[in-house]
Image (cartoon, rainbow, N blue to C red):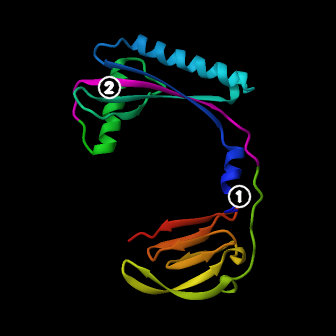
Amino acid sequence: MPGNFSAFGLLVADVRHDYARTRVAATVELPFAELRDILDEMREEGRLRLADEGFAAADMRFEARLDMRYVGQAFELSVPVPEAAAAMADIDAAFLATYEKRYAYAVPGPAEIVTFRLSAYGLVAKPTLPADLKGGDLAAALCGERAVAFAGRFHTTPVYERARLPATTRIEGPAIVEDAGASTLVPPDFSASLDAFGNLVLERRRA
C-alpha cells in the first residue's frame, strides 16, 4: 500500500508525549533520590495527560533518558535510564555503555547530566492484518529488462510487477519491482522476499 502507508501508520501509531528538563549536574554531586524525583514528576505529568486522553494505566508506557557527557565536553549522548537503576553508579555505568557503543571505547571519568527526558506513550490497539499469500510463478511477474548502472557499471536488470509476485518470492538483485505507486530497487548485493502480509523485505547478502 505505498500510497496509503503513511496514513495507515498515523492511524495505528501510539500516542507519544515528550517532556524535558534542562539541568546541568555532575553525577558525583547529584543524589540519586533527586534524580528519581525529577523523573517521577515528569512521569506523573505524562500519566495525567494520557489519562485525560482516555488511556487506562495498562495502556501506558514510559521511557526515561538522560542527555549526558563527560565533564568538559560540548556534546551529549542520549542514555536510557535502566529500569533497575538503584544508585548513581548505575547511571554512570549506563553512560559508559552508551559511550562505548557509539565510539567503540569508553574510560571511567567524571560525567554530567545536561537534560532529563521522559517519553509517555499511550498504546493504541493494533489491527490484525490479513495475510497475503498469492500463488503463482515468479516468471509470470517478469515484465521486462532494463540496463541499470550500479557503482558505475551497467547491469541487465529484470523488472517485476509487484502485484503478480507469488508468496514464495525470493529475488536476487539486481532487480526492479514496480508497483502502482512506487518502485523498489534491489541492488546487486541484496535479495528481496515477501513476508506473510505482502511486504517486500530487502536483505544484504552475506559475503
- The one of 144 and 107 positioned closer to us in this rendering: 144
- Residue type for callout 2: Asp
- In the picture, measured across the screen, residue 110 lies left or right of residue 136, that is left
Quarter-of-image position of residue 4: bottom right
At horizontal 39% and vertical 14% (from top left) the residue drawn is 32
At horizontal 30% and vertical 30% (from top left) the residue drawn is 69
- Residue tagged by mark 1? 4
Q: Which residues are magenta?
A: 107-127
At horizontal 67% and vertical 49% (from top left) the residue drawn is 9
Q: Quadrant of the C terminus?
A: bottom left
Vertical order, 159 against 134 (above or below): below
Q: What numbered label is drawn on residue 109?
A: none
- In the picture, measured across the screen, residue 163 lies left or right of residue 65, that is right
Mark closer to the observer (2, 1)? 1
- Give the mark nearest the N terminus, 2 or 1: 1
At horizontal 21% and vertical 34% (from top left) the residue drawn is 107
**At numbered mark 2, what does the secondary structure look like: helix, strand or loop?**
helix
Vertical order, 21 against 137 (above or below): above
**Mark 2 → mark 1, Cα distance in angstroms:** 44 Å
**At numbered mark 1, what does the secondary structure look like: helix, strand or loop?**
loop
Q: Mark 2 packing: few (<14 Cα in 10 Å), some, or many (20+)? A: many
Vertical order, 41 against 143 (above or below): above
Quarter-of-image position of residue 27: top left
Give coordinates of residue 41: x percent, y percent. 53, 15
Give coordinates of residue 53: x percent, y percent. 72, 26
Give coordinates of residue 155: x percent, y percent. 45, 86
Q: What numbered label is drawn on residue 92?
A: 2
- 169 drawn magenta: no
Give coordinates of residue 30: x percent, y percent. 34, 13
- Residue type for callout 1: Asn
